[in-house]
Structure formats: structure tokens, C-alpha cells
Image (cartoon, rainbow, N blue to C red):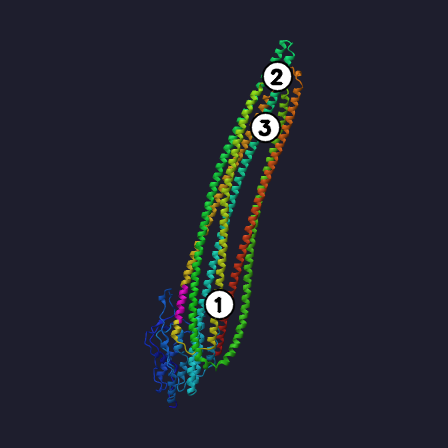
Amino acid sequence: MAEVERAPSVTEQVEDTKEATLPLTPVSDGDGFKHGDHEDHPNETPGPAEPAHEPEPEPSSESAEMDTPAENKKTAPASMSPAKPRASISTGARTRTTSLATGKVDSKAPAASASARKTSLAKTNQPTPAPASKRVSLTPSTATSSKPTAGPGKTAASSCGRFTYYRPSATAVAKAQTAKPAAATARPSPGARSKPTETVVEHIDWEGSARAARRTPSAKDAKYEVFERELKEKNEEVLSLREQVKTLEENVTSLKEASKNAEIAETRLNDELQSSKHALGSSELDKSKLQSLLEEAKKELNETLSNLDTKEFEYTELAARVQEFENTIAELRSANDVAKLEISALKEQHSTQGDLAIRVETEALTASHQASIEQFQIQIKETEAKLSAAEATISQLRSQISTFESEREELKNRISELEVEILEIREENEVDADNHAKELVKLKDAHSKELADAKSRLQADLEKIEMAHEEAVKKLEAAITAAGVEHTTKLDTALKEAQESAAESKKSALAALEEAHAKTVEVLQAQSSQELAEAKESHERSAALVAQEVENLKTELASQEDKYAAKVREVKVEHDKLVEEAYHRAKGEADGQHSKELAELRTRSDAAIKAIRSSHREELSHAEDTHREALESATKPLEKKINNLTVEANAARDDLAKAKNTISAQVTETKALQQQVSDLKQSLDKAASSSPKTTPSAEIESLRNELREMKDDYNALNDVYKSMQENYVATVNNHKLELEEAAKGRIEALETLKSKHEAEKAQFAEERASLLRKVEEERDRALSTLNSSRSPPVTPKHSRILSNGSRDNLERLHHANDARLTQLETEHKQAVAQLTINLMEVKDEKDRMSEEFGRRITELEDEKKQLGEELERKNMELSFQEEELNDTQDEVKQLQDELERLKAMTHEQAA
């Protein structure tokens, strides 16, 4: 035979590697490929199936039959992973990892093969034995590394008498260095990842087998073939490491999604804080309504006090009239005494006259005297009736005051009940806020724990990848220098294209982000304008209501002033008439017997007036004390409420500050994760620039299993977090419904109280009007009786007998009446001045209340503006965070596109 020995075909090498591996327990995936785990086996290194020095027989029918099954077998995709069950969170779900001691490669295999080739040229294609480990991965990457492709079997079978020779192709070397950093790319589909490895390996094996059939191998060629095989294995390992990095990047993206979910929960909690603030605002509105009720009660008390003042003024007028009558009686007594003296003098002077004339005059005087006595008795009875009527009116006023006090106590009880309800509502709000804060803390703790676990796992995976990368760099520095120049030129062109496409995609993404940002800004501006318009409308409504109340009060005061002026005029007219009548009657009244009766009447009237004045003063002092106590009891709880509201507002501001701090902490965490992603990119660049030589498959499998477990744990935790979030949303919705129902109930109760209060006010106004009518009727009756009872005075027949002394007395009476008139006018002016002062005080109080309401409204508007600014700041911060996340996602997409382009270029070069 011309050829000494035939080189072993690729199918025979596959059979040798099959004999070297341990038995597998078959586990089928979706593509029909059988995977399995090694049984626990001692640390042994399998040797080749045949010795290196034995001669290889010529190709025969048996070898052709052995080559045919390899053609029909398909190489499994490099990136396919078997179907895995859902892993639980428990620690018992982890798979067993094995030590790397069993995966050591026999370093004497290449030397033995070289010495065997010197003796016989049969086994130039002897493969290095595959390392055995206790546990083989279920992923297809190990299958591709241990089983070469079946494509070259045909060429080996067709070229029967040729030697095999491998020459490193440019595509195979380029395959080891074309991987760019892709730390944040998503995992590609299984078909897209399996095709490049199949085509490259088939091309390299076919080209190597074709060239090996043309030449005779040498020792240098055999070493080169060994390096090519190692390069293939390292390329496959680099692909598996890239897949691991992709899984790690997916974990990072899932962690970012978890942080986004936490931020969403935080925004929801901020919304709940806003709703609690709205509830506080409604409670403040309830408080303002209660204050308005208190002010109305104060107004009613002031009205009752004014009524008392009017009654007191009428009583003083009656007392003044009684005093006037007493003065007239005293003057008449003095005139009577003077008349008696004159009669005695006349008796002495005219003693000579007859007894008949004297008797006639004395009888006339006694008759006139008896008539005047009867008239004065009638006047005394009328004054006593007036006094009894005044006492009856005073008793009625006292009963009215007692009813007003009972109503005021009822109002106090209602106010206390409303305060208790408000306190209960506040306690409920505080309990809900505490529960929300606790849930926030729990969510943040869980999120921080998940981030810490993910960081620790990422660091461990990075350390393992760096160790493998360093070992691979040390072993493959000499093999990569030859093919570096061609690969760098191709990479430069690919990088330029990728950078241009990345810049275009970045510009488009920035434009989309700017459009979304402008839309969100427009929506926020529209919301803020709507809120401002609603606030302005509410303020205008409240101002219109206050103006209407002021106008009503002005109209009421004007009507009361007109009534009072008409009454004063009527009293003046009546007083003028009475003065004229008393002046005309006092001219002819002169009797001495009235002195004793008038003195008794004066003493009685003085005692009655003193008793009435003392009782009235006591009642006024008691009413003032009760009024002060009521004001103090009404103002103290309101001050306490204001202090509590200020404390709650400060607590809400502290909560907002804490939320801002948490947001800043999350921003720092996202920056740290971005830094880790950049570190992963750098490590991938290093791995791509220096492809490793050998990495233990057991360590890769353990890393893959750990990554799968991490994924399962993360999915389970994500499900738990979603369920907790749903429960939280349901509780929040229930709480909102309960708050709305409670607010509706409070509004209905306040409306009922308002209607009752208005009805009671109308009833009291009607009673007051009826009482005023009765008093006016009684006064008219009394005046009519006085006018009817006063008949013209009976003048004595011998009036000419009066001397100059009687004229002087009449002049004195006239001057006294003028003085009394001036005094009454001054008292009337003083009363009018006092009423005007009271009106001014009421107006000042109204102005002060309106200013306080305006100041309160401005404070509420300022607080609303501050809250709106804080919301805008939070929205801006969230928008910036979203922009950063979108930028990172765009970078990830750009890197993924670069990888796909590089893979496409490698496929084209291989084709």
C-alpha cells in the first residue's frame, strides 16, 4: 500500500471521546437531545480508546459504516438549555457542586502523540482526552465542546488514503476575539445562538480535514492542530461565559424593575398622605363651621343683652317719670302750705267779715281738696299697675334668659360631641398612617435584602469569571498573536458601523424622551391650573357669602335704628304732651294734705326702685360671668385643635423629608448597580480581547446552576412581592371608601344641625317680635289710661286772692320742667352715642373676623403652593431617574445590536 496508515476520522475521534466520558443518565429536552449527569465516580482521567503507537488499518466497509451515524447526528445548539422545573426558595433546592480536581487534563498526552507520530504516521489526528468530572452540565454547551460536529465525517470517508492536516483559519481565530462587551443585553433566541457555533466549527473541521488529506503531517502541524482544538474549546467557553453574563444582566434588570416597583409603592403612599391631608382639610372645614355656629350663638347672646339694655332703658324712663311725679307732688305740697298760711292770714285780716262767707270758702276749698286727693289716688294706682306690669316683663325676660342659657348648654354639648368625633377620626388617620409607615419599612427592608443578596451573588460570579479569565489569558497569549492583525482590522470596521448605528438610535431615543417629557409637563401644568381655578372659585364663593352676611347685618341695623328713632320721637311727643298737661294742671293744684301720702309713696317707690336696681345689677353681673366662662370654654378647645393641626402638619413635612431621603438612597443604589454593569462590561472586553485556553466545565456548570437557582428565587420573591402589593392596594381602597363614608355622615349631621339651628332662630325671632308687640301695646294702654284719668284741674273761685308767692312758685315749676327736658335730651343723646359705639365695635369685630378669614385662606393657599412645588420636585426627580434608566436600556440595546452585527459578519466571513 502506498500510504502507510490512514489517519483517524472525525467520527472515530468522537467515539474515542465517548469512551473517555463517564456514563450518563439520559434526560431529554425539547429538541430530542439526550443529556445526563455523571454518576459519582472516583477521580480518574480516562485514556484514549487505542494506544498511540498501534498502526491504523486502511479504510474499509466497517469504517464507512461507522462514519454514517455521525453524519445523521445533529450537533445540539450551543445556547440551548434543558427544560428546568420551577425551583423553590429553600436552600435544599440547590444542586450538588463538585470540586475541580477531577477535571485536570493529562499534560503528557500531546507529547505522547508527538512521539507516536515519529514512529508511525497513522495517528496524526489523535485528540487530547476530555477531562472527566463528577457532575456534567445539562446545557448543550458541554455537548458541543465534547462532541465535534459531524460534518467532516463525509470528507474523511470520501478521501480514503489521505492524511488529515489542520490549518488555522482566519474565521476561527476571529471568532475568539469578535465578542464585544455586552453586559446589559437581553438573552438571544436559541436558534440565533446555536447557528454561528455550528457553522464555524463545521467550516473549521471541513477545511482542516480537506487540507489534512493533501499533506503529510509534521510535529509542527500536530502542535498547531492541538492549539486549534484548544481555541475551539475556549471559544465555546467564552460563549458560555457570555451567556452567564447575559443572565447576570437580566438579574440586574429585574432588580431595577424591583426598584421601580418600590418607587411606585412609594408614590402610592405619598398619594395616601395627600388624601390624609385632604381629610385634615375637611376636618378644618368642620372646625370653621363649628366656629361659625359659636359666633351665631354669641350674636344671639349679644341680641339678648341688647334687649335687656332696651328693657332697662324703658325701666329707667318709667323711674324718671315717677320721679317727675314726685317732684310735682312736692311742689304742690309746698304750694298747699303757702295757701294755708295765706288762708290763716286772711282769717286774721278779715275776722270782721261774716262767718257765712268764710264757711262758703272753706267748703269750696275742702271740696277742691278732696277732688285732687281722689285724682292723686287714681294716679298712684296707675303707677302701681305699671310697676306690676314692668315686674311681669322682667320675669318674662328672666325666663327667656334661662331658655337661652339652656339652649347654649345644648349647643356646648353638641360642640363637645363633634369634637369627640373629630378626635376619633384623627386617631383613625394616625393609626392608618402608622400602618402605612410600617408597611413601607417592611418593603424597604425586603428590597434592601434582595439588593444585598444580588450584589453578593454578582460579586461571587464576577470573581469566578475573573479567575477563569486570568487562567485563560495566561494560556492563550501565545496562540492569539498570529491572528491578531486581521481580526483588529475587521473589528475596527465593525466598531465604526456599530458606533454610527448607536449614535442614530441614541438620537431617536433622546427625541422620544423629550416628547414624553413635554407631554408630562403639559399634563402637570393643566392639573395645577385646574386646582388653582377651583381654589379661586371656592375663595370667591366664601367672600360672596361673607359680603351677603355683612349686607344683611347692615340692613338689620338700619331697620333697628329707624325703629328706635321712631320710638324716640313718639316718646318725645308724648313727653311734651304730658309736660304741658302737668304744667297746666299744676297751676291750680294746692293742697296740704297730700304731703303725708306723697311721702309714703316716695319711700315705697324708692325702696322698690333700689330693690329692682340691685336685682338687675346682680343679674347683669351673673350674665357677664357666664358669658366669659362660655367664651373661655369655647376658645380653649379650639386653640388645642389648632395646636394639634400644626403638629400634624409638621409630622407630614417630616414624612416628606424622609421620603426624599429614601429616594436619594435609591438613586445611589441605582448608580452603584450601573457601576457594576460597567465593571461587567470591562471584564467582558478583557475576556473578548484575550480568549482563554481551558476552563473547567464543572465550575461553569456549577455557576450555571447557581444562576438558575438565583433566577428561581428571584421569580418566587417577585411573585410574593406582587401578592403583597395587591393586598396593600386592596386595603388602601377599603380605607378610602371608609373615609368617604365617614365624611358623608359628618356632612349630613352638620346639615341637620344647621337646619335645626335655623328653625330655632326663626322661632326665637318670632317670640321676640311678639314680646315687643305686647310691650308696645301695654305701654300704649298705660298712656291712654293716664291721659283719660287726668281731668282738668279745678281752680278755686277766689284765685285772685293768691299773692305774688304763687306766681313765683309757678315760675320755679316751669324752670324745673325745662331743666328736666334738657336732662332727658342729654340722656337720649348719650344713649344714641352708646348705641353708635356698640355698632362701631360690632363692625370692628366683623372686620377683624374677615381679616382673620383672609389670612387663613392665604396661609392655606401658601401651603397648597408648597405642596404643589414639592410634587413638581418629586415628579422631576422621577423623570430624571426614568431618563437614566432609559439611557441604560438604550445602551444595552446598542450593545446587543453590535453583538448581532459582529456575529453576522463572522458568519459571512465563515461562508
- For the point 53% across and 69% down, the residue is 505
* Residue under numbered circle 1: 674
- For the point 46% across and 41% down, the residue is 413
Disc 1 crowd rating (10 Å Cα; few below 14, some 14-19, many 20+) is some
**Is residue 792 something one can see in this rendering?**
no
Q: Is residue 754 left or right of residue 844?
A: left
How far apart, in angstroms, are the residues tagged by discs 1 and 2? 128 Å
Contact check, label 1 and label 3, Cβ < 8 Å: no
The spot of residue 833 in percent (x, y) is 61, 36
* Magenta residues, start to end: 703-715
Disc 2 crowd rating (10 Å Cα; few below 14, some 14-19, many 20+) is some
State which mark lies toward you, 1 or 3. 3
Q: Considering depth in this image, is 821 or 479 the residue closer to the camera?
A: 821
* Residue under numbered circle 2: 340
* Rendered image: mark on residue 716: none
The disc, 1 or 2, on the residue closer to the chain's N-terminal end is: 2
The disc, 3 or 2, on the residue closer to the chain's N-terminal end is: 3
> Is the residue 58 above or below the residue 187 in the image?
below
How far apart, in angstroms, are the residues tagged by discs 1 and 3? 99 Å
SS type, badge 3: helix
* Residue under numbered circle 3: 320
- For the point 55% across and 62% down, the residue is 515
How far apart, in angstroms, are the residues tagged by discs 3 and 2? 30 Å
Identity of the residue furthest to the bottom in this view: 2
Disc 3 crowd rating (10 Å Cα; few below 14, some 14-19, many 20+) is some
Magenta segment includes 838 = no
